[in-house]
Image: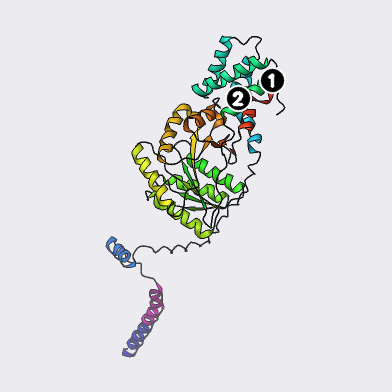
Amino acid sequence: MTDYLLIALALLGVLILGTVGLVAPKLRRRREPPLPTTEVETRAEEDVAGPPVEPAPAPPVQVPEVPVEVPVEVPEPTAGRLVRLRSRLSRSQSVFGKGLLGLLSRDRLDEETWEEIEDSLITADVGIDSTREIVDRLRERTRVLGTRTVAELRALLAAELVNALDPELDRALHTAPKDGVPAVLLVVGVNGAGKTTTCGKVARVLVADGRSVILGAADTFRAAAADQLETWAGRVGAETVRGPEGADPASVAFDAVKRGIETGVDTVLVDTAGRLQNKVGLMDELGKVKRVVEKHGPIDETLLILDATTGQNGLEQARVFTEAVDVTGVALTKLDGTAKGGIVISVQRKLGIPVKLVGLGEGKDDLAPFDPAQFVDALLGAEAGSDA
């Protein structure tokens, strides 16, 4: 009996061990669920990891700057330029060509007609004294010669106008070097009249006539003036000498002439300031520029830039410059924009200075050497019946 009990217990133990052996592996293969992540733990992990790192931008590619070469221009020759630009005087032609010749060709030249002729000349800015002289001579010649045709009257009027312009005056620009020293051309005039632009055009006139040029930017109180002058110079391959804004104008002018001597150019063109707020200060400044430059040698030409559209007011301004420096010639600009072409006569009579250059447009080569006969011929116009 005891044996049967032991056998039963043994079989039961084997059964239990077998069951455990089958269940245990399954329990080992079952994965435990993940523990919940708390907010505190999440923040701690972020603090340890830090912010996301962005990739560093690639360094910019360095493209070497290629200097832009400004092509050097060749200005057109000045010979015959005034003839080519004669059409620009169309507004003045209406006064001289049509107005005066229309009055002179009337059947009867009475006192009223001669007064109208005087009024026309005065309106054209010829000036009162010059007008009286021209009309008196014209009246006498028409009376003596008995002139009646339009062609004859035109010839008489042209002769009187040319005579009033004094064709014997020296109108050449003195720009030739002497003894290895370049000629010095000092440019003066009021600001606002296109002085710096005209100075650049004068440089083109000199280059067109075969001169090598250096420009001195002695208008140091306007940085734009030096920049503008440098642009004009670059177009014709010329060098510009300039100083910092507000520098001593006389020092810049001196350096420009010094540079001209070193490089052996023909002409040094010096642009000066033109402030009229303080007449005494302007005269002192220009006088200083003149004295300092003359340490290198005498100034060969002092050119006054005058705006034709300012008329008689411009002449009063110009008188300031003639008092400050020894002006030797006038460049009369903007003649194409006014009907008052007679200002040329008035300038010479009141200032006693020859007009050497005239501006007949806004183009870069619209500044022409002045010739009295060609100018009068252009004023009277082709419709007057002249073959000239």
| Residue corresponding to mark 1 | 152
> What secondary structure is the magenta-colored segment mainly?
helix
Is residue 201 placed above or below 89 in the rendered structure? Answer: below
Magenta region includes residue 365: no
Label 1 and label 2: CA atoms lie apart by 13 Å
Q: Which residue is located at x 66 percent, y 22 percent?
A: 154
Q: SS for tag 2? A: helix
Is residue 227 placed above or below 377 in the rendered structure? Answer: below
Q: Front-most of 195 and 176? A: 176
Residue 279, percent from left and from top: 36, 37
Q: Residues within 10 Å of mark 1 (few under 14, many from 20)?
A: some
Residue most toward the left?
A: 40
Q: Front-most of 189 and 30? A: 189
The image quarter containing residue 43 is bottom left
Screen quadrant of the C terminus? top right
Q: Amino acid at mark 2?
A: Glu
| Residue corresponding to mark 2 | 160
Q: Which residues are magenta?
A: 15-37
Residue 155, percent from left and from top: 67, 23
Q: Amino acid at mark 1?
A: Glu
The image quarter containing residue 374 is top right
Q: Residues within 10 Å of mark 2 (few under 14, many from 20)?
A: some
Screen quadrant of the N terminus? bottom left
State the mark number for residue 248.
none
Residue 46, percent from left and from top: 32, 64
